Structure formats: C-alpha cells, structure tokens
Image: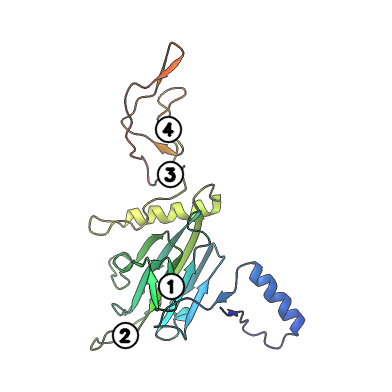
Amino acid sequence: MKNLCLIAGHSGWPFPALLSFCATFLLMGGCYHAAPSGPESDSCSTLVQNRFFGFFLSSSVFPTVPCSWTLQNPDPRRYTTFIKVTKPTGGCQPFQLRTFQYDSFLETTRTYLGMESFDEIVRLCDSSVPVAFLEAGKQFLQMRKGPPRAGMAIQNGDEDFKTEYLVVGKRNPSMAACQMLCQWLEDCLASSTSNRPCGIMQTPCLCWDKPPQLSLGDSCYHNGVYLENCLPSVKESGKDVEINGCSTQTGGRGLGLE
C-alpha cells in the first residue's frame, strides 16, 4: 500500500526539511493513504488512519466520481466510530452517496466482508432532518460517491455536505471526546422519530447527571447505569439481601458501558 503525503504550496522545500515535516505529520496521523476502496473508485480514494477526530467537506474529498473516503478503526475491540453528517442545503442526487461499514476487503475477488449499509440512516437528500448521526463498530467505515442513476435529472444547488468523525475508546474515554459525543447524542435524540430513530445506539460516556441515591450505599446505580424498578439491598445478619430484582433500563439520554 502506497503512502501519500502531499503538502500543497511546499513543493520547493529542501528534501531534508520536507522529510522531517512528513515524518512529524505521519506521527500525528495526519497523512492519508491509498484506500482499500473497491473497484468503483480506485483512482480517487482516501484512507484515514490513526485519527481520532476530524472533518471534511465533500467538495474536497469527492472532486469527481467515482470517489471514496474510508476511515479505519484502529481496533474495533477497543474503539467505536461515530459520524455526524451535515446534509447539503441545496440540490442533492439520491443514490449518489453510499455509506457503509465492513470488516475487510478482498483484492482477489474485489468483495467486501461483513458489509453493512448506513444509507437508510444517513438519507443525504432528506432535508426534513438536516443532520444525520451514526455509530460504527467494524474495521472500516466508507463513504462512496458515484454517478447518479441513468435518467435522473441533475438538480441545481449547493450539494456540498460536511462530515465529522469521532473515534472513542470503549473504556476510559477522554473528557473531550465525551463532551462532543454527548452533544451529538443530545442532537440525535432531539431529531429522532418513530420512523427515523437515532443512529447512535450506545456510548461509552455518561451523558447525564448521576441520579440521587435512594439510600446510603445504594446498589441500584452501578458502572454508570441507573437500574430502574430496583430497591437497594439491605443488611440482614451481616449479609446483603436483595429485596427486589432490577431491570436494566437506563435513565437519561445515553447508555453507559462498564
């Protein structure tokens, strides 16, 4: 796989200085690489690796069609990827953008393994909900822009859209990541309906205030999850005795992980 480190406006730099800049930039995870993007966009592809937050405008990543942008999860066992898509304000081509996650791509057969589509969550051309959110847990998440279907009229307007991404640790996430993710979750839930549920299913962050304890040493609040329909345990002959069973529903605006 060929690494690309293109620095606009610095083609005249001395080689040692350019090499030093690229080395620092690579350590920061700032360079992009050729992507395992599939047969439709081999000549126009971007792979983002070792980045935990960033954003892009579609006009810069998809200068032509077909084109693809791929975000690699450093370790799906330890991290979850979250995406926020601010939809275009003007014209939009349905079925032109595909969003999906997958485990791996086989070059020999040109096929994706474990592919799961997010098209019904993103719905780029649905202006009734201006922002879409989604959660991905597989190795790769890809957005691919292709030509519109034959016979479809081209609409005039601003088709540019913005995509933000956040890669959050499943255990001990940073405070900065949780602040942003909790805001995303709040916005996602505020715009969700029965026909369009929120695309964020769970978070590793505690996105609500801890409820008041029912009593000293309350056992109904455990690992960031408040157990409803629960009575705390009481002491009897030096042993803990649970009065009632607990359900695993959460209170507040998000789900906590252990």
What's the CA distance linking mark 1 and mark 4? 42 Å
Q: CA distance from mark 2 to mark 4?
A: 54 Å
Please name the amino acid that badge 2 sits on: Asn
Instruction: Please state if 118 lies on the left or on the right of 78 as rendered.
Output: left
Type of residue at label 1?
Answer: Phe
The residue carrying pointer 4 sits among few (fewer than 14), some (14 to 19) or many (20 or more) residues within 10 Å by Cα, namely some
Q: Earlier in the sequence, mark 2 or mark 1?
A: 1
> Which residue corresponds to mark 1?
105
Which is more foreground, mark 1 or mark 3? Answer: 1
C-alpha distance separating marks 2 and 1: 35 Å
Residue 151 visible within the image: yes
User: Disc 4 residue type?
Assistant: Tyr
On the image, the x and y values in percent for residue 172 come to 54, 47
Tell me the distance, in whole angstroms, between the alpha carbons under discs 1 and 3. 32 Å
Which of pointers 2 and 1 indicates the residue nearer the eye?
A: 1
Residues at marks 3 and 4 touching, judged by CB atoms closer than 8 Å: no
Badge 3 density bin: few <14, some 14–19, many ≥20, Cα 10 Å: some
- At 46% from the left and 44% from the top, the residue drawn is 206
Above or below for 204 versus 140: above
Mark 1 or 3 closer to N-term?
1
Number of numbered discs on residues: 4
Task: Give whichever of discs 3 and 4 has the lower sequence position.
Answer: 4
Residue hosting label 3? 256
Viewport quadrant of the N terminus: bottom right
Identify the residue under disc 2: 156
